[in-house]
Image (spheres, rainbow, N blue to C red):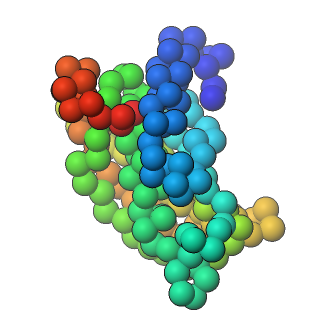
Amino acid sequence: MRTEQDPAFAEIAAHIHTNVGKQGFMNLVGAELSDLSRGECTIAVDRRPELLQQHGFFHGGVTAFLVDNATTIAAATSRGQPALTAEYKLNLLSPAVGEKLICRARVIKPGRQVSVVAADVFCVTDGVEKHTATALASIAMLNEEVATKTKSPAA
């Protein structure tokens, strides 16, 4: 978490970390929020048999989950408001073979109602990253009242 250049971001980051910790699916997959700054989020997951498809590649659903979560969290960091995925377009570029899958998301256009976020997914083998997927997402920005009514644990 990089808050030294943006002290106001510390409270936002703490809130996001708390909410991410409440996500059952994030815990089930074993994903970790590894980097967080304003407008950016990185989530990584280590290779486990449960996350692989029949050919030994990370399942496309794991890639999609990382994109979904990382883009939403990145959008939430912009203004500190809750967010939900509205839609995303995912291009799988090559089989995700490796020891770890990393998704890096960055806000392209922040908005009060919708933010546009890009994400790239890399598979790491022997410390070398291979670009395996790219995505563009529209993220619905919620107000606190809506998030509280729905009891959403989303960032």
Lateral position of residue 125 relative to residue 139, left or right: right
**Which residue is located at x 43 percent, y 58 percent?**
65
Q: Is residue 103 visible?
A: no
Residue 32: give x, y in percent of width and height. Answer: 60, 46
Residue 81: give x, y in percent of width and height. Answer: 33, 24
Residue 143: give x, y in percent of width and height. Answer: 22, 23
Quarter of the picture containing the C terminus is top left
Q: Is residue 114 above or below residue 7?
A: below
- Residue situated furthest top in the rendering: 7
Q: Is residue 155 above or below residue 94?
A: above
**Which residue is located at x 19 percent, y 26 percent?**
149
Quarter of the picture containing the N terminus is top right
**Which residue is located at x 36 percent, y 34 percent?**
153
Q: Is residue 106 above or below residue 134?
A: above
**Which residue is located at x 31 percent, y 62 percent?**
89
Residue 140: give x, y in percent of width and height. Answer: 24, 39
| Foreground pick, 151 / 52 | 151
